[in-house]
């Protein structure tokens, strides 16, 4: 149903003029560069223009100095339909999101240093420690390493993309998505901020986790909020999380030893019993 709606929304014609999105990608590229999320020619950004076309950053360009006319338009198979030069070498990763998540309108890939440090250390950001992160992103899983720009990278992401708006890429960086480019970029900021906070907490002796009950309340609150603001992408994600919440196994059931530390959980303690693939 959601997929049909998304296709009906944009097939055959731009939803808005490309110019707006070209300027937006250049602006967000400058934000990423100034924040130190990318250096040199690292990172890439894209926006879904309509049901058939994607606007993406060119290969080898500094994201802090992009010009609107340098951006490339491709179809959903990656064939260039407008622009000179080559699209980003990570285009297939972006197209994976657009194929698997019909309501996603933008993808952001960068190498923010603290979050990337966790990815290099092989650590997902799954601890439930900050309410804002739980509410917005749920957990931030770690996709297995794949050579950048290859099908191997996409293969490692495929099972995670349908359920998560932010994913760490092992020994590489971070990829985020959103219903618009600003949201996708803000998710990148949230991931890096979360990584910094967790790093500091661990240097001070370790983070204290939110309880299972506290996480459940955040999920209920989020569901009510997205129902009131009619955000279709957030509603889609929220519905997935309600299903996941109902599927939580209580790690304390029948285990008195675990009950002693029962109120402190990581998300990985709440693994759903069945696949959440879209
Ligand atoms: Zn990269």
Image (spheres, helix red, strand yellow):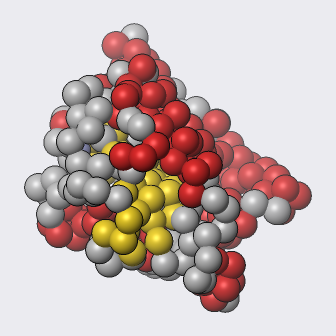
Instruction: Specify the quadrant of the image occupied by residue 157.
Output: bottom left
Image vertical order of residue 20 relative to residue 160, above or below: above
Residue at 23% x, 48% y: name it: 59
Residue at 72% x, 66% y: name it: 232
Residue at 55% x, 65% y: name it: 49
Looking at the image, which is closer to me, 85 or 34?
85
Q: At which x and y percent is residue 82?
A: 38, 65
**Is there any visible trace of residue 89 in the rendered image?**
yes
Relative horizontal placement of residue 130, taking residue 25 as reference (left or right): right
The single residue placed furthest to the right in the displayed view is 228
Looking at the image, which is closer to me, 59 or 185?
59
Looking at the image, which is closer to me, 212 or 89?
89
Q: At which x and y percent is residue 186?
A: 56, 37
Q: At which x and y percent is residue 220?
A: 76, 56
Q: At which x and y percent is residue 106?
A: 51, 56
Quadrant in which the N terminus appears: bottom right
The single residue placed furthest to the top in the displayed view is 204
Instruction: Specify the quadrant of the image occupied by residue 77.
Output: bottom left
Residue at 45% x, 28% y: name it: 30
**Is there any visible trace of residue 191 in the rendered image?**
no
Image vertical order of residue 31 relative to residue 224, above or below: above
Image vertical order of residue 131 relative to residue 270, above or below: above
Relative horizontal placement of residue 217, taking residue 71 as reference (left or right): right
Ligand 1 quadrant in view: top left
């Amino acid at each position: 149903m959601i997929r049909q709606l998304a296709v009906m929304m944009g097939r055959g014609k731009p939803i808005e003029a490309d110019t707006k999105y070209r300027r937006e990608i250049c602006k967000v590229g400058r934000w990423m560069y100034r924040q130190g999320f990318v250096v040199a020619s690292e990172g890439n950004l894209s926006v879904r223009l309509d049901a058939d076309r994607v606007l993406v950053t060119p290969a080898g360009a500094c994201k802090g100095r992009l010009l609107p006319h340098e951006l490339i338009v491709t179809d959903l198979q990656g064939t260039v339909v407008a622009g000179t030069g080559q699209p980003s070498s990570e285009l297939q990763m972006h197209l994976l999101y657009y194929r698997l998540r019909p309501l996603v309108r933008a993808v952001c890939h960068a190498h923010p240093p603290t979050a990337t440090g966790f990815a290099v250390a092989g650590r997902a950001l799954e601890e439930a420690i900050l309410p804002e992160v739980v509410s917005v992103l749920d957990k931030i899983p770690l996709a297995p390493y794949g050579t950048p720009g290859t099908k191997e990278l996409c293969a490692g992401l495929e099972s995670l993309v349908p359920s998560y708006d932010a994913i760490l890429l092992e020994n590489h960086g971070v990829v985020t998505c959103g219903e618009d480019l600003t949201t996708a970029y803000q998710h990148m900021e949230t991931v890096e901020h979360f990584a910094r906070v967790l790093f500091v907490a661990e240097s001070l002796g370790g983070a204290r986790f939110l309880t299972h009950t506290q996480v459940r309340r955040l999920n209920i609150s989020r569901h009510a909020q997205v129902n009131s603001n009619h955000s279709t992408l957030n509603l889609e994600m929220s519905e997935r999380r309600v299903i996941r919440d109902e599927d939580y196994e209580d790690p304390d059931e029948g285990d008195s030893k675990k009950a002693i530390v029962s109120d402190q959980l990581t998300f990985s303690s709440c693994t759903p019993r069945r696949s959440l693939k879209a």
